[in-house]
Image (tube, grey):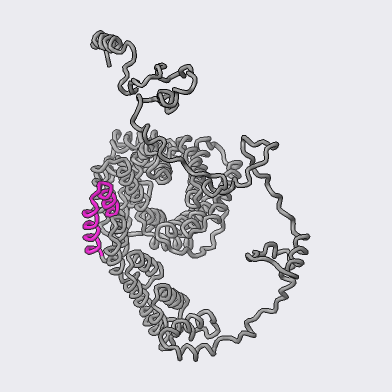
Amino acid sequence: ALAAAGSAGSAAALWSEVNRCGQNGDFARALKSVNKILQISKDDVTALQCKVVCLIQNGNFKEALSVINTHTKVLTSDVIAFEKAYCEYRLNRIENALKTIQSASQQTDKLKELYGQVLYRLERYDDCLAAYRDLIRNSQDEYEEERKTNLSAVVAAQSTWEKVMPEDLGLREATYELCYNSACALIGQGKLNEAMKKLQKAEAFFLFALIFLQDVTEEDIEAELAIIHGQMAYIMQLQGRTEDALQLYNQIIKLKPTDVGLLAVIANNIITINKDQNVFDSKKKVKLTNAEGVEHKLSKKQLQAIEFNKALLAMYTNQADQCRKLSASLQSQSPEHLLPVLIQAAQLCREKQHAKAVVLLQDFADQHPANAAEIKLTMAQLKIAQGSITKACMILRSIEELQHKPGMVSALVTMYSHEEDIDSAIEVFTQAIQWYQQFQASQTRGTNPKSPVHLSLIREAANFKLKHGRKKEAISDLEELWKQNPKDVHTLAQLISAYSLVDPEKAKVLSKHLPSSDTMSLKVDVDALENSHGATYVRKKAGKLTGDSQQKEQGQGDVKKKKKKKKGKLPKNYDPKVTPDPERWLPMRERSYYRGRKKGKKKDQVGKGTQGSTTAGSSELDASKTASSPPTSPRPGSAAAVSATSNVIPPRHQKPAGAPATKKKQQQKKKKGAKGGW
């Protein structure tokens, strides 16, 4: 009895210690007291609950969950449902947390709050929105502002990831969190300028709130501002201000925030800016996307986008095997997604395996008809790159849902024109026009008004046929256009021109609808127009002016400025004292003093004399010319003087003095220098 009384007294003291520590927030010390109580009574439900709470407060979620699972008989789901679900939620076992909440017999307010968080993490935004609306409607406590913040976060997620137009919930943007979430919703709608203003407002709210906050560290301030600035940089990137965005992204990374999710998003965005440039920087940044816990911080679409960019980076860095591995993994996770197969096809094209790329794309299009259009567009692009324009046209024409689109019609007509296949181009126009006729007939119950797109196609078809000489085929299109707008004179003129080659009588009948020349003439004062400042140049016709016209020209010449004549250039040997030759402009043969060339004088000298000898030197050697004339001294470079006798040795047979000796010396020199010669 005394032992029992002593244990009861110690237990009471321990419970009072637990209560005091709990109020002071000292859960580590409270846990020690709870463990002592459990040594006295190991199945005490209250003690076990207190132990679980202490472990949760200390962040030991695994140990807390282990205690719950160990004592399932005592800690039933009704007793400990919230604590168990919360541990599973914090351990990122979201599906298990949802089951635990749904299995609870009584849905308390705490479970409903946690249920909303679990639905948000599971990206079930519609259910989450309904849960928070119910909480706000049925709760009256100090946490109403937090619930509204969570509600705005759900709306922002719907707008961003599901492209749902958010409804106005009437939330007053009284805090920076509400402003931030509102900005995110605007980004999802594409209203970037408004979103930037909201973010600036959120930043101002946060800085103002710091005045009333205590015990806020500089790291906390930088962490909150980094989230706002990161979203600002994202807006800049979407607006095409990549340099500004990149600068802001790098500033955030230098701060080294502890939020791994924020760092992963910023690193991914920098990689998308770098693309195939600055690959070394991208390889450094991609490490931030692999940090531990990133998968629990980001949404599925964010994680998927990061994996896509990793595969593209592997392709740009020529890591073919890594690229194939990543794209295959992505395809297994999302078999219907386009990007993995497009990345694989791009990698094959980089390896010059275009045929395999086309086969891969065709197989995907056959397996997923819903995405066949985009895949076939890529196939057509590959065919064009290979120069197979006709095959590309065939692929494009197989996309039935795009055949009537103006962009598709324009592309096909351009390619067929390049291949000079005019008939196929006209057929494309015809099919598109027929589609619009059938569609509009079904929509308007026979009234058949022409839409702007339909009329523009008819107009382009008519112009194309006229351009390529198919006037007969253009008549039906021109008649259709003229019926829609009988006042269109240009179309009527084209129609008359077309009929003039096919049916002249019809052309005459239609020409009556043309406006008269009187209505078309313009009342213009020609003299005033000619004298205006605009008429500054009149092209003169060739021919002489006579009579009055000369006088008019002289009168106009007084008004016009005369151009200064440039002085002609004189020859370098010009002598002003000597009268120039009056016949200098005539060819030499036509001048009066030209006597022609003297023929036959040099014929006899061709092939005679030593090589390099001049005609002057050879004439001196002619005895018949020099016999009667006085002797002259030899010129430099000429042969030696010879006596004027009849026994003259011809120059070709002459040998210079000392020739044999010179020849021997040259041979000796060659022999001596043979070793070191050229």
Judge whether residue 12 can be spotted in this image.
no
Q: Residue at x 21, y 60 (%)?
A: 363
Q: Give the mark count.
A: 0
Q: Which quadrant, please, contains the N terminus?
A: top left
Q: Nearer the viewer, residue 659 or 143?
A: 659
Across and down, in percent, residue 3 comes to 29, 33
Q: Taking 50 as reference, is 477 above or below it?
A: below
Horizontal arrangement in the rendering, residue 3 relative to residue 127 (left or right): left
Q: Residue at x 41, y 82 (%)?
A: 440
Horizontal arrangement in the rendering, residue 225 relative to residue 395 (left or right): right
Residue 277 in magenta stretch: no
Q: Taking 111 as reference, is 42 above or below it?
A: above
Judge whether residue 153 can be spotted in this image.
yes
Residue 356 in magenta stretch: yes
Q: Nearer the viewer, residue 509 or 376?
A: 509
Q: Nearer the viewer, residue 400 or 387?
A: 387
Q: Determine which quarter of the picture holds residue 385.
A: bottom left
Across and down, in percent, residue 152 comes to 48, 57
| Span shown in magenta | 340-368
Q: Nearer the viewer, residue 287 or 51?
A: 287
Across and down, in percent, residue 609 comes to 35, 26
Q: Residue at x 46, y 64 (%)?
A: 165
Horizontal arrangement in the rendering, residue 391 relative to residue 165 (left or right): left
Q: Which quadrant, please, contains the C terminus?
A: top left
